[in-house]
Image (cartoon, coloured by chain):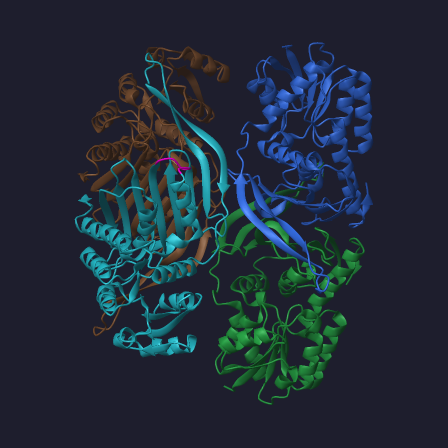
Chain colours: A brown, B cyan, C green, D blue
Amino acid sequence: MTALNFGLIGFGYWGPNLARNFGAQENCAVSWICDLSPARQKQATASWPAARTTGRLEDVLEDPEVHAVLIATPVSTHFEIAKRAIEAGKHVFIEKPMTHTSAEAQALIELAEKHQRVLAVDHTFLFTGAVRKMKEMLDSGELGDLLYFDSVRINLGLFQHDINVLFDLGPHDLSIADHLFPVKPIALRAMGACHCGQKHENLVYLHLEFENGMVAHFHWNWLAPVKIRHTLLCGTKKMIVYDDMAASEKVKVYDKGIVVSQLDQDSLAKFRVDYRVGDMVAPKLDQREALAAEAAHFADCVRNNKTPLADGHAGLRVVRMLEAAQESLRKGGERIVL
Amino acid sequence: MTALNFGLIGFGYWGPNLARNFGAQENCAVSWICDLSPARQKQATASWPAARTTGRLEDVLEDPEVHAVLIATPVSTHFEIAKRAIEAGKHVFIEKPMTHTSAEAQALIELAEKHQRVLAVDHTFLFTGAVRKMKEMLDSGELGDLLYFDSVRINLGLFQHDINVLFDLGPHDLSIADHLFPVKPIALRAMGACHCGQKHENLVYLHLEFENGMVAHFHWNWLAPVKIRHTLLCGTKKMIVYDDMAASEKVKVYDKGIVVSQLDQDSLAKFRVDYRVGDMVAPKLDQREALAAEAAHFADCVRNNKTPLADGHAGLRVVRMLEAAQESLRKGGERIVL
Amino acid sequence: MTALNFGLIGFGYWGPNLARNFGAQENCAVSWICDLSPARQKQATASWPAARTTGRLEDVLEDPEVHAVLIATPVSTHFEIAKRAIEAGKHVFIEKPMTHTSAEAQALIELAEKHQRVLAVDHTFLFTGAVRKMKEMLDSGELGDLLYFDSVRINLGLFQHDINVLFDLGPHDLSIADHLFPVKPIALRAMGACHCGQKHENLVYLHLEFENGMVAHFHWNWLAPVKIRHTLLCGTKKMIVYDDMAASEKVKVYDKGIVVSQLDQDSLAKFRVDYRVGDMVAPKLDQREALAAEAAHFADCVRNNKTPLADGHAGLRVVRMLEAAQESLRKGGERIVL
Amino acid sequence: MTALNFGLIGFGYWGPNLARNFGAQENCAVSWICDLSPARQKQATASWPAARTTGRLEDVLEDPEVHAVLIATPVSTHFEIAKRAIEAGKHVFIEKPMTHTSAEAQALIELAEKHQRVLAVDHTFLFTGAVRKMKEMLDSGELGDLLYFDSVRINLGLFQHDINVLFDLGPHDLSIADHLFPVKPIALRAMGACHCGQKHENLVYLHLEFENGMVAHFHWNWLAPVKIRHTLLCGTKKMIVYDDMAASEKVKVYDKGIVVSQLDQDSLAKFRVDYRVGDMVAPKLDQREALAAEAAHFADCVRNNKTPLADGHAGLRVVRMLEAAQESLRKGGERIVL
C-alpha cells in the first residue's frame, strides 16, 4: 500500500479532527500543517510533533512528498487554495461547503479533471452509520417511492459574523438530502429572519420542490433553546425517523403506510384512505467515526484513482442550492428555479 | 344562577365531548341533540337520556327554552346553522374553523352584534393549562419581545376527503398563535403536497410574516410515522418549548438568550453575540380539562353578557389565515398579503 | 350465544370499568350493581339505568337470572363475598389481589371446584397487548432462557390507610411475572420503609429467587416525583424493555446478548465474555383495551366451561408471594422460603 | 504557585484521562508515566512526549522532583503502591475503589497521617456539576430531610474476570451516596446473580438501612439492553431525579411532597395524606469536566496542605460498604451490620 502524505491547510475548529483521522489511516501521515496564526501553529506542533508547521501555503504545495491537501480554512478561501493545490499536482479534500459560489465549484471540477486529480468534498454525514443505512434501504426499494424529507437542525448557537445559519448548518442536511434523493430538486423557496440586530439570518426555512411531487423542507436555527436534529424520510412503503441526538437507535424504520382503496362509483367519496401500522425496527448501525471512514475512502480514491462518494459534482450541487436559497432569502421567499 | 339549556347540533366525533362538558356545568343542561343520522340520534339517546333528539334543526331553534346552540357539524354548514340560530335569538358556540370563508365569518359577527347574541368559537386550546400559562408569561413581559413561533403538528392521520390538512390541523395552531401574538401577521406563504393520488394536501408548511420582524412557521402533516406536537416560542429574554405529547412538564421555560455586545471600532467584526444559559423551569399547569373550562366560560358569557375570549373576531382572523394560506397553496407558495 | 347476566359488587374506583366492559360484551348485561353507599348506588343508576341497584348482597345472589358476580370491593371482603356467591351457584370474577390470605384463596379454589363454578381473578395486565406479546415471545423460545426480571412501578400516589404499597402496586407486577415465568420462585426477601409517620410501607423492594439461578426484583413506591413503569426481561438470546408509560412502542426487543468463549488452557482467564448487538424491534401490539379482552375471555369461560387464564391458582400464587413478602417486611428483609 | 510534578502509575483505561487532566493544571506536569506493559509505555511516549516512561515503580518514587503519584492500576495493587509512595514522601491520589479491603484502607490513612501526606481517592462524580448541585441543595435544607435514595446504573457491559459488578459500578454510586448522606448506614443486604456460567456477579442489588428510617437502594447490572443512570433523591420538601444519560437537564428538582393532616378523632382513619405538586426546576449545572475540577482540587490540597473532599476516610467508608456487600452476597442476602 502506497504511503500517502497529507498537507493540512487550516488548523481551527475542524482541522484537528482531520489531522487525527487522516493521520490514523494505514500508511498515511499528515506531514504539513499550515495556518496563518502562529498560536495555532504552536498548538499543531504540540499535538502533531511529526508534522512540520508553516504559515506559507507554498511550503506545502512545493513539497513533492505531499500527495494531497486537506482544506479546512474559511469558505471564502476554499477556491483559491484548492485551485493552487490542483495546479501544483495535489489531490484535494475540501471542507463543506465546497466553495462560496457555484462558478468556483464548476471551475474546480474542470481543473481537477484536466489535471486528473481527485477532488473530494467533506460531506461527513454520508459516512455515518445512520445515513449509510438509510441510503441502503432507499436503494433496495424497501421504503418505496420517496414522498417527503423533513429536517430540523436547531440549537442555541453562536451567531457567526461572516455567514448566516444557511451556510453554517445547511450544508449538513443538503449533502444528506442530495445523497439520498434519487432525483434532483427543480425549484426552491427560502424564508428567514435576522434577529438581535444582526444582518445575517439566524433562522432559515428552506423548501425544495421536485418534479415527481416529492418535497423537502428544512428548519435551521441558531436561536433555539434545545438542540434538535430530527429528520423524517417518508416513503410509500416505509417511513424513517432519524434522530441524531438519540444516544442509541438513531434510525427508526416504521412499517407504516397509506392504503388507498377505490370505492363504489355511487359513493360520494371516490376513494378511501386507510393506514397500515406494523412493527418498528431500529437497525444496528455501524458505530465507526464517520470521519475515519471518510479518510479511509479518500485515501483509497487517491491510491486507486477512484471517484469519491462526495466528489466535486456533489459539492457543486450543494453550493447551487445554497446559492439559490440565498437569492430566495434576499427576495423574501420568491421561488428560484434550479 | 340562571338555568341554561343548550341545543347541540351535530353528534359526530366532537359532539359527545360538548354534551359531556356543557351538560356538566352548574345549572346547565343539554336539552336537545340534533343530528341527521338516525344511528347517531340513537347513540345520543343512549348516552344522554335527558336530552331530546331530533333530525330537524327547527325543533331546536323553535324551542324557547333553548338559550344557546352548540354547532359541531361539518364546517361547510356552520354559517347557515349559526345564522339561523342567531336569527332565532340563540347564543352560538361554533366549532373551529368558524366558517368556510371570511365573508361568512364577517356576516355572522355583524348578525350577532345586531341581535346582541354571544358568538363564540371553539378554540379549545386557549383553555388548556399550557396555553394559559404561556399567555400569562407573555403578557407579563417575562419572555421579552417575541422573535419567532414554530409549531410542528404531525401524525399518521386519516386523509379526509372533504378538507386538506390545513383546515384539519391548522386551526389548532393558528388559534393558539392568534391568541399569543401581540401583533397580527401581514403576509404569508404556504407550500404543500398531495400524495397518494389525492387532491387535498396531506402536508402543508405555512410561514407568517409580521411587521416587527417576528416570524411564525407551521408544519402540518397526516403522513408522519410519529405523533408530534412541538412548539417553540422564542422571546428576547426567555424561550419556551411546549410539547403537548409530554405526559408531564408540557411547558418548559428556558432562561436562555442572546447577548449582543458592541466591539471596538477597530475590530473587524462590529459586534459579538454570546448566549446566556440559566435554569429551566417547567411550571405547574392547571390540569382541568380545557373543554370544561371553555364551557364554564361560555356559560358565564351568556349569563353576564360578556365577550368570549375566542369571539367572532378571533374566529374570523383564523379563517382569514386559512383562506389566504389556501390561496398561497393554490399559487405554489406565492406571498399573500393579509 | 347464551345471554349472560352479571351482578357487580362494589362500585368504587374500579367497578365502573367492569360495568362498562362486561356490559359491552355480546349478549351480556350487568343486571345488578350492589354497593353499600347510597351515593354510589345513585351514580350507578345514572350511568347504568338498565341495571338494578341495591345495598344488599342477597338481592344479587338470590336472583336466579344472575350467572356470575364481579367482585370489586375492598380486598378484606373478597373471600366472604366470593364464598357466598359460589355457594349460591354463581361464577366469580374477583379483583386482584384475590384474597387477603392464601388460606382464603385455597378455600375458594376448593369451593369452586366442588360447585363446578368458574373462578377468575382480575389480573388485567395479562390481557394487554404488551404482556401478550412478551408471553408469546417467551413461549416461542425467541428470548432463550430467562435470566432476570426487573420491574419499577413508582409514582406520587395517595398513601392508602388500609394497605401498604406492596398490596396496592405489587399484584400488577406479580401477576405479570407469574404469568411469564416458566418456573416458580423458591424464596424471597422484601425491604421497605414507612415515611411521613405512617405505619404502612410506602416504599417496598422485593427480591425473588428461582431454582435455576433466575432472579426477579421489584421496586414499588408511592413517593416518587415521576411516574415510571419500566420492566426489563432478559433472556439468553434477547432482552426486552417494557415501558408502559411510552405513548407508543411500549415493548422493545433487543437482539443483544452475551457470548462466552472458552480460552486457551494457558490463559490466566479461563473464558472471555463478549456481547453481541443487533437490531431492536418494537413489535406491533394489539391496541384493544385489556379489560375488554378479559371480559370476553371470562364470558367465554363461563359459557364453555373453560379454565380462565388467571384462575384461582394464579390468584393464589400471587397472594402467597404477597403474604410471604409481608412476612419478610415484618422481619426486616429475612429470607422467606415459598 | 509552586510547580508540581506528578508520577502516573498505570496507563490502561483511566490513566490517559488522569495524564490529560492533571497535566493541564496550572504549573503542573506529569513527569513520569509508569506501566508494566511496554506497549502502553510506547503509547504514553507518543501521547505525552514530555513525560519519561518506565516499567519500574522505583524510578518514579526515587525521583525527588515528583511531588505526588496518581495510582490507576488494578485495585489489588493499590495498597502496595500507595504504601510505598507515601513512605517515599509522595502525596497520593488513588483510583476508586481505594483498596481491596478496609484494613488496607485504614492502614493507608494512618500512614498518610504519620507522614503528613495528602491522601485522596478518585471519587470523580463528587466533582460533577450534577452532584455538586445536589449537595448544595441538600446542605441548604431545601430538600428537607432525606427519605430515600434509589439508583439504577445498568448497561450491556463486558464481564470482567477479576471483579464483579459490585466492585465495578458500585463505587460510583456509593461514593455519591456517602458524599450526600448526612448520616451513615447501619446495615445492608446485597442480592445478586451470576449468569452465563460466570463466578462473579453480573447483577447486584444493594439495600442500605439508616438509623433515621432513610433507606438507599442500588441496582447494578452488566446485562441490560439499555444504558440507564437514574437516581432518585427524595426529601420531605423536594424530590430530585438525576439522569446522567440526559444530554441536558440532568438534574430535575420537583417541588412535590406529602402533606399529612390529622383527622377528627371520630374518623376511622387517623390521618389523611395528600400530595402537593408545584413547579419543576432543572438548575443550570457547571459544565466543566469533573476530572479537571478534581485535579485542580488535588493540586490545591497538595500545595496548601488541605484535606481533600474525598480523603482516605471517604475512601474507607466506600470500601467498607463494598466489603460488607460482598459478604452479604456470599451469604445470600443476609443482613450485615456496618
- The structure residue drawn at horizontal position 43% and vertical position 47%, both measured from the top left corner, is B133
Q: Which quadrant does the C terminus of chain D fall into?
A: top right
Q: Is residue A162 highlighted in magenta?
A: no
Q: Nearer the viewer, residue C125 or A136?
A: C125
Q: Is residue B143 highlighted in magenta?
A: yes
Q: In which quarter of the image is residue A320?
A: top left
Q: In which quarter of the image is residue D269?
A: bottom right
Where is C126 relative to B267, above or below? below
Q: Nearer the viewer, residue D331 or B100?
A: B100
In the rendered view, does C198 fall on the left or right side of B65? right
Count of numbered tags: 0
In the rendered view, does A97 fall on the left or right side of C96? left
Q: Position of residue D273 (x, y in %)?
A: 65, 56
Q: Which quadrant does the N terminus of chain D fall into?
A: top right
In the rendered view, does B84 fall on the left or right side of A70? left
* Highlighted magenta segment, given as a residue range: B141-145
Q: Where is residue C249 in the image (x, y as percent from the top left)?
A: 48, 55
Q: Where is residue B26 in the image (x, y as percent from the top left)?
A: 45, 66
Where is C255 relative to A318, above or below? below
Q: Can residue B160 be seen in this snapshot?
A: yes
Where is D134 relative to D220, above or below? above
Q: Which of D312 and D327 is in front in this view?
A: D312
> Magenta span: helix, strand or loop, mainly?
loop
Q: Can residue D54 be seen in this snapshot?
A: no
Q: Position of residue C307 (x, y in %)?
A: 62, 78
